[in-house]
Amino acid sequence: MLSKSQIKLITSLKQKKYRQQHGFFVVEGIKTINELLNSNFVLHTLYTTDSFNINAINEVIISNSDLKRISFLTSPNKALAIFKTPKAKNIDESGLIVALDSISDPGNLGTIIRLCDWFGVKELVCSKETVDCYNPKVIQATMGSIARVNVNYVDLAQFLKASNLPVYGAFMEGESVYLKTTLEDGIIVMGNEANGVSKEIESLISEKISIPRFGDFQATESLNVATAAAVLLSEFKRR
């Protein structure tokens, strides 16, 4: 049976301040846990209803009812693990980089991390106002891709000013990405779900690009930011 202190620690990790205080984050689901076990992430404790056959010191067999008590999911998936939060790695500016300006939805961030992994983008740079990548909902949405994408939180304006790479920004009024004659490796900036790219960051954009609407009525206001990121990354990689 789980102790009160174990339950308190696990449930506290739903909040960013306790993740930062303890240096841990929660991962749920067998697939995602296995992805991180096979990466450089360091396991603290694995709580599972079925043995993973790893070091017994790190594995705790629990009942389904105990898993429901600690899970953040409506339907828990056999296991919950606590991993140590890794130290941030230096940003490699040798290839394509995605930069996020105040993304607030955990599902969007998790999907964008997964997209970066899919398209071979190793560096994701986030403004300090962007949702925490170790939020349980973000981790769930990455489906393990968090293990292969280097996520950094920076002063985004200062980062863009210091970079020598071209900076592309996603804007409704930008030039169609399909009509651009050249698309170089650089930084693709995606803006906040409700407000787009902020004025401060907009002033640092080299080229504004857009995804044209093809519908007969063209009444849709905008694309979801993760959907837009998928289209832009596909086009950059296709070139």
Image (cartoon, rainbow, N blue to C red):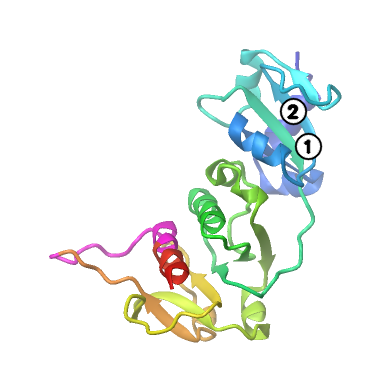
- In the displayed structure, 196 sits above or below 116; it is below
Which residue is more in the foreground, 204 or 163? 163
Residue for badge 2: 46
| SS at mark 1 in the image | strand
- How crowded pointer 2 is (Cα within 10 Å; few <14, some 14-19, many 20+) is rated as many
Q: Residue at x 41, y 69 (%)?
A: 235
Callout 2 secondary element: strand
Give how far across and how far down residue 61 sits, in percent. 74, 16
Write down the residue under mark 1.
Answer: 43
Kind of residue at badge 1: Leu
For image coordinates 66% across by 17% down, the residue present is 49
Residue at screen point 27% across, 65% down: 221
Q: Quadrant of residue 128?
A: bottom right
Labels 1 and 2 touching (C-beta < 8 A): yes
Relative placement, left or right, of 221 versus 196 is left
Is the C terminus in the top left, top right, bottom left or bottom right quadrant? bottom left
Q: Position of residue 223 (x, y in %)?
A: 34, 61
Residue 68 can be seen in this image = yes
Q: Magenta part mainly helix, strand or loop?
A: loop
Depicted 75 relative to depicted 39: above or below = above
Q: Nearer the viewer, residue 38 or 97?
A: 38
